Amino acid sequence: MSPDPTPQLEKIRALALALPEAAERLSHGSPGFHIAKGKFFAYFWHNHHGDGETIVIVKTSGRDEQAMLIEMDPDCYYSPPYMGPSGWIAMRLDRDDVDWDRVGDRIAASWELVAPRRLLEAGGRCATKRPPPRRPPQSRSPSPLQRPSRCRARRCRSRPIAR
C-alpha cells in the first residue's frame, strides 16, 4: 500500500477528466469519474475497507474480457469486491512498474462503454473536451398531425368542424 495516494489520484484524475464531458464526484467516499449527468466509468480506491490496495476500477465489456485480463496479467488486474461480478476490473496502482499508458487506455475504453452515442459520433475520446454545440431552433411549420384542430368550441379542441 502506498502511504500517500495523492500522486496516483492526480494521474487518474488527469486521465479521466481529459475525456469529453467527464466529471468527478464522490461515490461511497471515494473519487468516481462519470460522464456529466451520466454513468460512472472509473473509480479510485485507496485502502478500501483496509485491503491495503491503491487501485483504479474500470468497466470492461463483460466477464469474458475481465477473465482474459486477469489471466493475462494477474499482478496488475483482479476482480474487485462488489463490482467484479458485474464485469468491472481493478488495476493495481501501488506498484513501482505501473504502465500509465495502459491505465489511460483502460480508462478511455471504459469511458467508451458508457458514453452516449452523440459523444461517440462526435469523435469519442479523440474529441476535444467542450460542450456539444447548440442547435438553432428549427423554423419549419408543424406537420398536419401536429396542428391544432379547427374546432371553434372552446371545450372541444379535438373535433374538426363539419362543413
Image (spheres, rainbow, N blue to C red):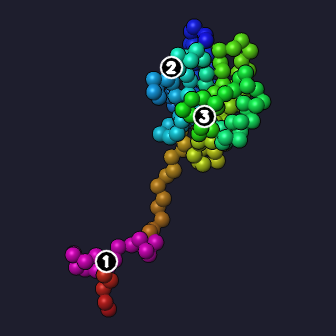
- Amino acid carrying label 2: it is His
Bounds of the magenta span? 143-158
- Left or right: residue 52 versus residue 27 is right
Q: Position of residue 105 (x, y in %)?
A: 70, 30
Q: In this picture, is 117 found above or below 18?
A: below
Question: Which residue is pictured at 67% across the width and 27% down the height?
Answer: 78
Q: Which mark is residue 43?
A: none
- Residue lying furthest right in this view? 72
Q: Residue 45 lies in what quarter of the image? A: top right
Marks 2 and 3, Cα distance to the nearest angstrom?
Answer: 16 Å
Q: Nearer the viewer, residue 102 or 138?
A: 102
**Residue at figure coordinates x 50%, y 37% from the top left:** 36
Place residue 54 in its image quadrant.
top right
Residue denoted by label 1: 158
- Farthest residue toward the top? 3
3D distance between C-alphas at marks 3 and 1: 55 Å
Residue on which the image places disc 2: 49
Question: Can you give x and y, in whole percent of width and height, for residue 91 in the image?
Answer: 66, 25
- Looking at the rendered image, the disc whose residue lies closer to the viewer, 2 or 1, is 2
Q: Circle 3 is placed at which residue position?
A: 84
Q: Are marks 2 and 3 in contact (CB under 8 Å)?
A: no
Image depth: mark 3 or mark 1 in front: 3
